[in-house]
């Protein structure tokens, strides 16, 4: 994976969805955006709600996300480490 643009804070000009926690990112809301290249180029959006947990996951030595953390990795991490929050965010009930 190559980094085309390192993570940086931007203000949303249209609605997006957080790539880690699925939260809707509203127009005018600040979020972290990065651009990566694998076999194709894509943007990765990370909202303020989950950013502290994303940072924490990367710093948690029990896990190895040195190759990057997918959305599924993050969901697994949250269900493992912050089950109450994960249920609040993603529970269908
Ligand atoms: Zn998020």
Image (cartoon, grey):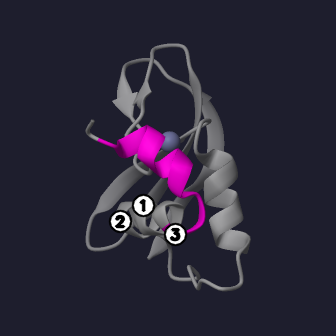
Does mark 2's beta carbon lie closer than 8 Å to ligand 1? no
Residue annotated with mark 3: 80
Q: Residue 3: percent from the left, percent from the top?
A: 53, 66
Q: Is residue 66 above or below residue 45?
A: below
The overriding secondary structure of the stretch rendered in magenta is: helix
Disc 1 to disc 3: CB gap under 8 Å: no
Front-lying residue, 23 or 9: 23
Q: Is residue 1 left or right of residue 39?
A: right
**Range of magenta residues:** 80-91
First reached walking from the N terminus: tag 1 or tag 3: 1
Q: Position of residue 40 (x, y in %)?
A: 27, 65
Q: Which is nearer the N-term, disc 3 or disc 2?
A: 2
The residue under the point 54% across, 13% down is: 28
Q: Quadrant of residue 89?
A: top left
Residue 37 image offset from top left, x and y in percent? 39, 66
* x, y percent for residue 5: 56, 54
Indicate the secondary structure of the residue bearing disc 2: helix
Residue in the image at 50% along x and 22% along y: 12
Q: Is residue 36 above or below residue 24?
A: below
User: In terms of depth relative to the viewer, which is nearer, 84 or 75?
Assistant: 84
Q: Residue at x 71, y 84 (%)?
A: 61
Tag 2 residue: 72
Task: State how far apart marks 2 and 1 are (Cα).
Answer: 5 Å
Position of residue 40 relative to residue 66, above or below, is above
Is label 3 in contact with label 2 (beta carbons under 8 Å)? no
| Residue 21 shows up from this direction | no
Q: Please give the label number shown on residue 75.
A: 1
Marks 2/1 in contact by CB < 8 Å: the verdict is yes
Residue 36 within the magenta-colored segment of the rendering: no
């Amino acid at each position: 994976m190559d980094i085309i643009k390192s993570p940086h804070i931007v203000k949303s000009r249209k609605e997006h969805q957080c790539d880690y926690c699925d939260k809707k990112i509203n127009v005018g809301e600040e979020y972290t955006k990065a651009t990566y290249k694998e076999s194709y180029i894509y943007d990765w959006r990370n909202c303020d709600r989950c950013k502290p947990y994303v940072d924490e996951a990367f710093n948690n030595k029990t896990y190895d996300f040195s190759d990057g953390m997918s959305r599924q990795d993050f969901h697994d991490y949250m269900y493992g480490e912050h089950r109450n929050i994960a249920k609040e965010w993603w529970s269908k009930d």
